Amino acid sequence: MRLSTKGRYAVTAMLDLALNGKNGPVTLAEISENQGISLSYLEQLFAALRTKELVRGVRGPGGGYYLGKSADDISIANIICAVDEWVEFTRCGGRQNCSGGARCLTHTLWDDLSSEIFNFLAGISLGDLVRRNLNKKEEEDTLSVVTSSDSQAA
Amino acid sequence: MRLSTKGRYAVTAMLDLALNGKNGPVTLAEISENQGISLSYLEQLFAALRTKELVRGVRGPGGGYYLGKSADDISIANIICAVDEWVEFTRCGGRQNCSGGARCLTHTLWDDLSSEIFNFLAGISLGDLVRRNLNKKEEEDTLSVVTSSDSQAA
DNA sequence: GTATTTCCCACTAATTCAGTTGGTATTTAG
DNA sequence: CTAAATACCAACTGAATTAGTGGGAAATAC
């Protein structure tokens, strides 16, 4: 498992796409502007996202990118895997010799943790993120009506 | 949030320490041998772990490292933060101007996700990992007696 | 046919990773 | 007291990754 700034850029860009792609495709130029990521770097990221069919490109004027599937069918793990290659970890080649056993045990423990992190991220979709934020915003708004006088909690 | 191979090395080394540190300190040379990590790189990692008081060094012959606290009081997030610096993300400085709002929204979404990942990793301790593995091993052993014939599930 | 956009590839500066080298400080074993 | 073992410290290094540049080619709307 690996979660780098590269993965963060990809998730951020996909979020932008999910939020702004309701009506018509979104150009990389717009995402670049919105998120402050260089156009060429976005191109690299989207090349990877496209091969995994997480996005769909439309060329020509008025073109841009759509999500490749429903936001609910795209998990955070999908996105990160697409751009970060997801190198599988040294599994000591199954049950083979691995310098004594102690090493193999910690490798197993790490592998377990790693797949747990993966499952966690695989359980969160783009759609979830967007909806969660809307819900929270609603709560905050409702709350701020009630407690508008002491909104200075800092 | 950031999870690199550096963090993986640190967690692996701490796991080794948790497993082998029951009676007496563990030397970096042993961990290096067990886990196949260079001694000097371990020194760098443990310098960071030491400043965060996750480990305690004992010099001289017969010396080595102890866990700085109980394995149950050390979370995976603690370890990764210690070696990976845990750069806080562009928060657009609270609610300030952030190129239009669309950008700030995705930043907020990312921040939420990021802290969710953090909380997830903060909820898993070294002790948890060790115990979980022991439990699973027990299950597997019991299971393998029952289903030993079809253990080839690929 | 031209402007807009994706798509593609080769190159690069900066950073991080992982390790090397060569020490110094401290403590134990003998 | 001496020598060995160990943590501790800092500068340097090759390799990989990150993030970005530059120069295009291909598709498509107008």
Image (cartoon, coloured by chain):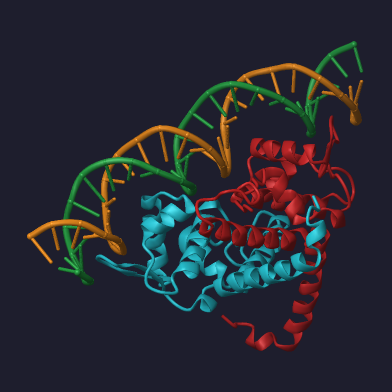
Chain colours: A cyan, B red, C orange, D green
Q: Is residue D7 left or right of residue A96?
A: right
Name the quadrant containing residue A24.
bottom left
How many labels were placed on the picture?
0
Image coordinates for residue C15, horizontal then vertical, percent: 53, 37
Identified at 66% across, 45% down, the residue is B84
Give whichever of B137, B56 is nearer the camera. B56
Q: Looking at the image, is C23 positioned above or below residue A36?
A: above
Residue B22 or residue C5, whichever sits in front: C5
Judged left or right of residue A6, residue A105 is right
The residue lying at 29 percent from left, 67 percent from top is A62
Q: Could one spot residue A89 in this view of the protein?
A: no
* Residue A9 seen by the camera: yes
Q: Position of residue C7 (x, y in %)?
A: 29, 62
Residue closer to the observer: A132 or B17: A132
Q: Is A35 placed above or below A123 here? A: above
Q: In the rendering, at what x and y percent does residue C18 appear?
A: 58, 43
Q: Is residue A9 left or right of residue B131?
A: left
Q: Residue A87: give x, y in percent of width and height.
A: 52, 60
Q: Quadrant of the N terminus of chain A?
A: bottom right
Q: Quadrant of residue B108?
A: bottom right
Please report the residue visible at 85 percent of the width from the left and 35 percent of the height from the top. Answer: B63
Rendered position, B110 above or below C25: below
